[in-house]
Amino acid sequence: MNDFEQLNDITAPLLYWYQGAARDLPWRRDPTPYHVWISEIMLQQTRVEAVRGYYARFLAAFPTVAALSEADDDQLNKVWQGLGYYSRARNLKRAAVMLMRDFGGELPADHAALLTLPGVGAYTAGAIGSIAFGLPTPAVDGNVLRVVTRLCANGMDITKQATKDRVTAALAAMYPQTPDEAAMMTQALMELGAVVCVPGGAPHCTECPLASTCLAHAEGRETEFPKKPPRRARTVENRTIFMLRHEGRYAIRRRPEMGLLSGLWEFPGVDEEIGADGVSDILARWGITALSVAPIAPAKHIFTHIEWHMTGYLCETQGTSDAFLWETPKEILERYSVPSAFRAYLRLLDADTADGIASV
Ligand code: SF4
């Protein structure tokens, strides 16, 4: 028996359901190749509701491939600020430059050519190809893997590339060949995974157009799929963050060009937990003397594999140091891309623009 036999019966009920159930999302209203590309990159690792506002803001700043190819890096990071995974923004610009140079400023209607663009993997190429160009190219992400493995009660480990390849091949073999239906199929599978065959608990099988076909549902084993190995524990990194203030201006610096949050701006910090009695030694390394030191409430930020546990201090300083830029809170908030890992400190800056930080 074919492991994915259930897929043979899903097209008609799924497309019919999608036409009545599709959410009204901004990128579905005018699915040009550029719009589909930007939205698909934004939707990687990020929830639909969070993407809505960013999508409009991004298109207002960079309405075309040409505009994106000429984007100022700091402006690009600023527009992306809060979405996280900033390498996505850098790859968008690199790809836009490549599109201008090699493809006449247009996204190519060709799966293999799409795959040559920075930041575009099999999933994104499949999504752009089918949604924007009507190619019969499936887009297999976590949502689709969940739907397919439940439909087929398939116990393959979905974190393995071999599983993605097999699911992609099985879908490609049954994908509708007309452009409109291919475009709809990709979106319908994504939509079903996002709103009906949901992760993290029981799916909404009573609302599912595929319930009569679904093996996991027939066997009452919906929550046994998809299979994946236990999550690796995150590494905890202790950090100390210094909000150094001199005459109303705060010190910021650019992070290294390689590694986590590369090229973005941050408040100075060290990769260890420093007690209040150790602050002056750290500041001395930067040639700075503190007039006052006040602790800031501890903060935590969770990345995919790392957790930052942050201790913080607000220090009024006697002078400045050339090691940093010293800017007003308003300038930092408006012009510099400080990632949301520093959200707790940005909130204090925000308070400072209004009425000064009376206490922390
Ligand atoms: S019947 Fe339930 S488990 Fe099966 S595809 Fe539909 S929502 Fe998912």
Image (spheres, rainbow, N blue to C red):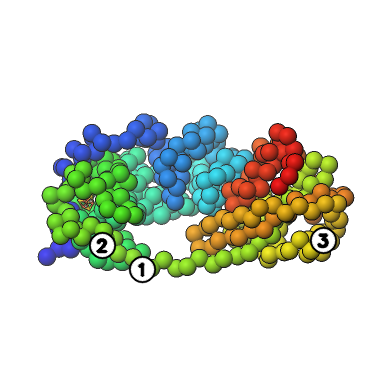
Dot 2, crowdedness within 10 Å: few (<14), some or many (≥20)?
some
Of the residues under marks 2 and 3, which one precedes in the sequence? 2
Asked whether mark 1 lies closer than 8 Å to ligand 1, one says no
Q: Quadrant of the N terminus?
A: bottom left
Tell me if 259 is positioned left or right of 120 in this view.
right
**Residue corresponding to mark 2:** 224
**Could you say which disc has been placed on residue 280 in the image?**
3
**Label 3 CA crowd tier, 10 Å (few <14, some 14–19, many 20+):** some
- Left or right: residue 226 versus residue 74 is left
Q: Residue 81 placed where, x, y %? A: 57, 44
The residue that appears at 31% across and 54% down in the rendered structure is 201
User: Disc 1, disc 3: CB below 8 Å?
Assistant: no
Per the model, the C-alpha gap separating discs 1 and 3 is 46 Å
Residue 151, picture quadrant: bottom left
Compare residues 165 and 223 and report the one nearer the observer.
Answer: 223
Front residue of 44 and 65: 44
Hey, what amino acid is under mark 2? Answer: Glu
Dot 3 falls on a residue whose secondary structure is helix
Labels 2 and 3 touching (C-beta < 8 A): no
Q: Nearer the viewer, residue 238 or 99?
A: 238
Q: Residues within 10 Å of mark 1 (few under 14, many from 20)?
A: few
Where does label 1 land, which residue?
229
Q: Is 308 left, or right, of 275 in this rendering?
A: left
| Residue 6 in view, yes or no | no
Which image quadrant is residue 352 in?
A: top right
Q: Secondary structure at mark 2?
A: helix
Disc 3 marks which amino acid?
Answer: Ser
Tell me, yes or no, if residue 287 can be seen here: yes
Task: Please say if the residues under marks 2 and 1 sit with CB atoms less than 8 Å apart.
Answer: no
